[in-house]
Amino acid sequence: MQKRLMVQGRLSDAQLGELSDLFKVDVLAKTSALDAPENRALLAEAHGIIGSGLAITPQLLDAAPNLEVIATVSVGYDNIPVDELTKRGIMLCNTPDVLTETTADTGFALVMATARRVVELAEWVKAGEWQASIGPALFGSDVHGKTLGMVGFGRIGQAVARRGALGFGMPVLYSNASPKPALERELGAKRCELNQLLAEADFVCVTVPLTAETEHLIGAKEFAQMKPTGIFINIARGKVVDEAALIHALENGAIQAAGLDVFEQEPLAASSTLPTMANVVALPHIGSATHETRDAMAQRAVNNIRLALQGERPISLVNQETYQ
């Protein structure tokens, strides 16, 4: 019997063709939820689901008794109940590694843009305000030689740190991670407690995953520990930061600026004050949003689901215990 897949999100024609050569593929409309009434019959027969932004619930899993694997086109999977999948013997695959360097590029772009006030001053020029040489009121801050504090030191955190240490001569501190002796030797990085990092770093960059332990890891207390000249960067998950506390810190000069690619609510609420603040660079969650990287992520997901449904070990399996 040919196994059946549900596809939600964007795959290339070549990737869809690769899957269609092996499986019966049902491509959902962009606006159609997995568990929408029109998809119930497909769910009942599906052996695999592949896509981005997948909303998986126990109720949806109840409607998919033949499901063997879910392949998400993302690194994060905080919207997917991993324990529930594991209990049911369903594999979950994600796409780490292939987006590491691109996301680190985004993180360091935010470092540069906030420090040198790139967005603010570009808008100032567009508005016709550039009538004479700028004065100290519009000066930015240096990046080279400043201390970079990494909250989290996984693949992406390490890639950001390499850019800072090797490209800009930045001393690197890291916290909320296990010791990394090899990287300490390579980059001169130093492991420390979070409070020390916050007090000493000129740039605080968050790259930790979202878990029960890291939700609102950075709040009012943490912003109060930063330098008034400190710049805060978040390329992790929005809920790692207490957004109300961040806004208060920015409005009251507790920190100098923030560069944000993620938010507690996405898309960002129209009522949010963050994008209207001159000392904030707000991006629409573009960490991995390049043609090359998104294609590579989709291909990793395709490879994962193909291997899983052919009885082989997927490349990126989250719940390892489900593979027999």
Image: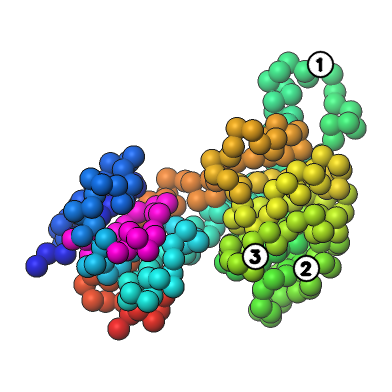
Q: Amino acid at mark 1?
A: Gln
Residue 68: percent from the left, percent from the top?
27, 70
User: In the displayed structure, does residue 202 sit left or right of residue 21?
Assistant: right
In the rendered image, which residue does mark 2 sit on? 194
Distance from disc 2 to disc 1, alpha carbons, whole Å, reads 44 Å
User: In the displayed structure, does residue 39 sit left or right of residue 77?
Assistant: left
User: In the displayed structure, does residue 323 sit left or right of residue 292?
Assistant: left
Q: Earlier in the sequence, mark 3 or mark 2?
A: 2
Q: Nearer the viewer, residue 96 or 238?
A: 238
> Which label is found at residue 95?
none
What SS does tag 1 mark?
loop
| Quadrant that contains the N terminus | bottom left
Identify the residue at image location x=44%, y=73%: 83
What SS does tag 2 mark?
helix
Is 53 part of what is drawn in magenta? yes
Distance from disc 3 to disc 1, alpha carbons, whole Å, reads 47 Å
Q: Amino acid at mark 3?
A: Thr
Q: Is residue 233 visible?
A: no
Residue 40: percent from the left, percent from the top?
23, 52
What SS does tag 3 mark?
loop
Residue 29: percent from the left, percent from the top?
28, 41
Count of numbered circles in the view? 3
Q: Earlier in the sequence, mark 3 or mark 1?
A: 1
Q: What is the residue that sits farthest to the right in this orientation? A: 136
Q: Amino acid at mark 2?
A: Leu
Q: Residues within 10 Å of mark 1 (few under 14, many from 20)?
A: few
In the rendered image, which residue does mark 1 sit on? 131
- Magenta-colored span: 45-62
Residue 51: quarter of image = bottom left
Q: Nearer the viewer, residue 176 or 35?
A: 35
> Which label is found at residue 214?
3
